[in-house]
Structures are given as structure tokens and as C-alpha cells.
Image (cartoon, coloured by chain):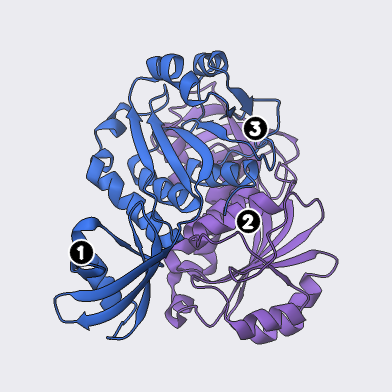
Chain colours: A blue, B purple
Amino acid sequence: MNLILLFKNDFIGSGKVRLKGRRFNHIKKVHRACEGDILSVGLVNQRMGTGLVTKITSQFVEMEVFLDTPPPVGLPLVLVLALPRPKMVRRIIQAVTCLGVKKIYLVNAWRVEKSFWSSPVLIRENLEKELILGLEQAKDTILPEIFLKPLFKPFVVEELPVIAENTLALAAHPKSCLSCPNNINTPVTLAVGPEGGFIDIEIKTLNQAGFKTVTLGKRILRTETAVPVLISRITSLIQ
Amino acid sequence: MNLILLFKNDFIGSGKVRLKGRRFNHIKKVHRACEGDILSVGLVNQRMGTGLVTKITSQFVEMEVFLDTPPPVGLPLVLVLALPRPKMVRRIIQAVTCLGVKKIYLVNAWRVEKSFWSSPVLIRENLEKELILGLEQAKDTILPEIFLKPLFKPFVVEELPVIAENTLALAAHPKSCLSCPNNINTPVTLAVGPEGGFIDIEIKTLNQAGFKTVTLGKRILRTETAVPVLISRITSLIQ
């Protein structure tokens, strides 16, 4: 927790917060904070700054917070990701949140196992936990949006062309002949398939929606590796 | 398992292998292979090719193998990594093996917890399991070398300048003013610190060993994300 993410209901007065539970435990056990210590804090979707510990008990911590710094700029990259297996979802969501992605579409695909869609990982508040962990790690406050799209074709045909408008639309596809571009400085919409890749008809649908297929080469990467590698290669805008 | 990695002692005759255990189970349950099926195989540190399933029982599978394809070229990047927490070690070793890294030094640093060095993850045969999983995932046969260096200073002062000779030597350091370079096409030696980074004296020692410090920006990434992101950004040579 490189930044303690605050929410409006943490405030007990003007510029004063009281924290219990997970964040309190972390401040006590990991930061080992004492009264008078200064910690990095940020208000969700608002500015970041410092928290002066004014009181710490066995139940809660209180801080006076000064929010004077804008959060880092988000990455101009929308991620469209075939739903990975549930234990990967958590890691990938955290990692891309760390990298500054602010819009994530989790979509269906032929090679996505149906059971993945009923995983508790996809419950809104569980997804939000991962987003928060990512923001706390990266020192950011802007909560990414996640959209679940369990129907591939209607999403790609009707919604995706609008989402990808005025962006470079790329679909990672191991069979492509085109090498993934480097160091783009325009907005990107990046589609990444499931383990085993999109099937041919899905690639065709993506092509018709304006997506160019690109490859990272012969090596077949796990989704959890491929996604950060693609984002890092494509964009020069990680801040 | 996108490639079934074979070892010399799998051979029961010229061009003929018999597999039991993990690989047999995978071929039977995941590939659901039958006699006559053709699978991707590769001999460790040798060529890759195909395996024709000639016999499959409840105990073992036999294949005739044809090894006619060279493995993908390794990445000209040596990774020097402050020992991560044990559960991360497994993932990171697998991920960098997938990416084609062939030399990995796991080193000590001030912020590495001492207990990490006695983790069973670091037993030679456990590390080798992770390397094998990485090769099977990426379709590669060349086993990376891993070296354990539990003494930071003697390693960096005496050994690292020789290892990094004639390479671009970079140390990832969040406090650096120099942005991590993109798309290098020369050999690289990349040093990555622990969670929280190298301490100042360690950075000084690395500088004296010829390392330039570079940063990915303000966002603080977990080691498991930072390493693939750095490798992807630095090298244009992932194949």
C-alpha cells in the first residue's frame, strides 16, 4: 500500500478521516505508524497528498489530510480482454490498474470457459477490491471502469466500433503477420484473446469492427504476461 | 503445455519416447490425445518438432518424435533480480522464461527479507520445474540458467562488471530522472530491485559497476508486473 486510498465516508470532519479494518491494520502493522507520522494518501477520483497521523488506538487511526497533488494521468488505452480464468482475473485487473488503464471490457469468446462467468470474482464489489489494490500500489486515485460483456458478437459489432472510434484498434493474435507496433503516442483500443487465442470467426468480426491483428512473435505467453507486455510495448505514455 | 518438453531419459529407442506422470496426464486429460494424433514436442536444449502418438494406455503414452525445427532465439538480456518473495519467484521465473530470458541472477539486497533465502522455492529442482513450465508455455527448449547470489556487494563489485561487459547495463530505479529507453537492439543487462527499490548505497554500487539508473515513471509497479513491462519496453528482440 504505497498510497492509502480514502473514500468520502472516511471523513469525520473537514480534512479529517478515521480508518478501521484493512487500511488501519496495514498502517499499524506494515507502516508501523505513530502519532505525528506522515503517510501518502489520496481521495478516490480526486487529488492525492499527505495524511498526518493525529491519533492511533487499537481500533482505528485518525489523520488530518492535505490533498494538493493531482493523480498521475491515466493511460489512453482501452483494454478489451477475453475473460481470463478467475484467479488470473484478479492479478490482471490489479496489474493493468497499476499501469494506468482506466477502461476495461471483459468479454466472452469461444475459448472462454462458460463457468468463468459465474465466478464470484466478477461480483462488482470483488472487482472493485482489485481496482483499489491496484490504485494503492501505483499511487493513483482514479478508479478504472470495468464492463462485463458476456455476448461477444453484439458487443463487437454494435458497441466496439464506437468505443474504438478515433483510436488505433489492435487485436493481439499469434497468427498475425504484423508485428505489434512500438511506442505509439495516440490512443489505443487493445483486444486480447483467451488462452489459445480468438478463433478465426472472432478475428473476422474484430477486423470488421476496425481492428488490425498484431503479434508479439512465436512465443506463446500466458494472458497475465501478455497483457503487461503488450501495453508496455504499444504505449509510450505510461507515467 | 503448448509444447511437450522431452528429456534424454524419456527415450526408449531411436526417435521413440515413453512418458508417464505429469506430461502423460496432461496429454491424456487436456490434449485428450488418441493414437495417431500429432503433438508439439521439443528436446531440452535441442530442436523442436512433432510427436506422433503410437500408444496410449492408462499408465503411459508413447510417441515417435521428429525433431526438425530450431527453438526460438533467446533474448539477449541478462536479468539481475533482487530475490522476490517466494510465491512471486515462481511466477516471475515462469514469465521471464516465456519471454526468452536465458540468464537470471537472483541477488540479495537490503530490502530482501532474509527468510526468503531459505524458501524451498530456491531448491534447484523446484526452480527447474518453473523453467520447464515456462518453456512448455512459450514453445521453447533452451533451459535458462539461474544463479543465486546471496551476497550483494561481492557479486555487484566483482562479478557483475564481467557479466555486463559489452551490454547496455540498466538498473530500474523509481527515483531516476532518466526514462527507461525503448526498443533497444543491443544486448542488455537489466537489474531490478526489491519491492521498495534498491537503497541509495546499492544504487551507488551498481553505478560504479557501470549501471545507469532508469525509471518507468511515477507509478510503482509490483515486481511481477515491472519485470515483463521493463523487458518489453527495453527490447525489440522478443521473438
Which amino acid does the dot numbered 2 rest on?
Answer: Leu
Q: Nearer the viewer, mark 2 or mark 3?
A: 2
Q: Is residue B133 left or right of residue B215?
A: left
Please name the residue shown 66% across and 51% down the image.
B233
Q: Secondary structure at mark 3?
A: loop
Q: How far separated are the C-alphas under marks 3 and 1?
A: 48 Å
Question: Which percent across, then down, holds residue A8?
Answer: 23, 57
Q: Could you tell me if residue B100 is visible in this image?
A: no
Give neighbour class at mark 2: few <14, some 14-19, many 20+ (Cα, 10 Å): many
Q: Secondary structure at mark 1?
A: strand
Which quadrant is the C terminus of chain A positioned in?
bottom right
Question: Which percent across, then down, holds residue B81?
Answer: 60, 68
- Same-chain check, marks 2 and 3: no
Q: Which residue is mark 2?
A: B230
Give me the disc on residue A11: 1
Please name the residue shown 29% across and 52% down the image.
A129
Q: Earlier in the sequence, mark 3 or mark 1?
A: 1
Q: Is residue B38 above or below residue A90?
A: above
Q: Is residue A226 left or right of residue B14?
A: left
Which amino acid does the dot numbered 1 rest on?
Answer: Phe
- Closer to us: A128 or A73: A73
Would you identify the image quadrant in which residue A42 lies? bottom left
Question: Which percent across, then down, holds residue B133?
Answer: 52, 49
Task: Identify the subunit bearing mark 3.
Answer: A
Which amino acid does the dot numbered 3 rest on?
Answer: Thr
Q: Which residue is mark 3?
A: A215
